[in-house]
Amino acid sequence: MKHLNILLLLLAWALSWPAGAQPAKTKILLLGTVHFETPHKDRYELKTDDFRSPRRQQELEALTALLARTHARQVMIERPHERQAAVDSLYQQYLAGRYALAISEREQLGFRLARQLRLPHITCVDELSTNPHDSLMTATAAAGQQALLREMGVAATALLGSFDAELKKGTITDVLRFINQPAQLRANLALYLQYMARIGAGQNFAGAGAVSDWYLRNLMIYANIISQVRPGDGYIVVIFGQGHIPILKHLLENNDQFEVVDVQAALR
């Protein structure tokens, strides 16, 4: 009954808007990336090359020029929300020429883009969560599901191998076009839904618990994103590891306040 009352209140509020008075949708570009730094905290990660090399720096400038055409009003990055003050300080030092960008897509791309857009601020929207199911997954694998974990490892290695091949032969923009294709986004999500979710099924459901933790983290990121949108923010760029994008895309596409922009068109 309580939930029904809340829904009725929300419906009454929505119907109180005059016809045609609904605010315009905010365009949001979800840009999935590889992590520039190594090692990272991911279970499977790409062994990246030197993003400070002259070649990669030129590619980053070209990519930034493409993204700057959006005239975005905010750039959101994969940094924990509680580190906002520290990131603000680094960004201000960077604007003043007193800070060299670290090897990180959050800075090499996020800071660089925000400066080109003349933004005074970078928005941190990440949330970190622990995974209490790791030990259960290990125990379940020891009980007879090692083959499933091997299958997941093979699939993850193949996915990262395709990313690495693109990085070796193409520019950073080429790589981002590739990894943001629908097939590549589905392949990443499949690691969780096709493999991990089956671990411990019918017993301790350790895999399902681990997948739920991943979804919860992305739900918290989503909540941070939508709560940071301001009136007049017509366009927002969100820069996150590629694995987050399928879930964030699903959530934002089902929120009528947002229009998720086609990455391929934005990088053309």
Image (spheres, rainbow, N blue to C red):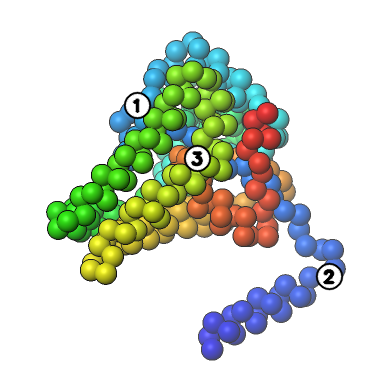
Asked if the residue under mark 2 is in contact with the one under mark 3, i.e. CB atoms within 8 Å, the reply is no
Q: Is the residue 78 above or below the residue 139 in the image?
A: above
Residue 47, labelled with which disc? 1
Which residue bears the numbered disc 2? 18
Q: Amino acid at mark 3?
A: Gln
Q: Does any portion of residue 95 appear in the rendered image?
A: no
Query: SS for tag 1?
Result: loop
Depth check: give the residue in front, 15 or 136: 136
Residue under the image location 69 percent in, 77 percent down = 11
The residue that appears at 56% across and 55% down in the rendered structure is 250
Which residue corresponds to mark 3?
Answer: 184
Between label 1 and label 3, give the one nearer the viewer. 3
Task: Please state which amino acid type lies under the numbered disc 1.
Answer: Lys
Three-letter amino acid code at the position of disc 2: Pro
Local packing at callout 3 (Cα closer than 10 Å; few below 14, some 14-19, many 20+) is some
State the separation of the CA atoms marked 3 and 2: 42 Å
Q: Secondary structure at mark 3?
A: helix
Does 70 sit left or right of 54 as displayed? right
| Front residue (pair 206, 33) | 206
Q: Earlier in the sequence, mark 1 or mark 3?
A: 1
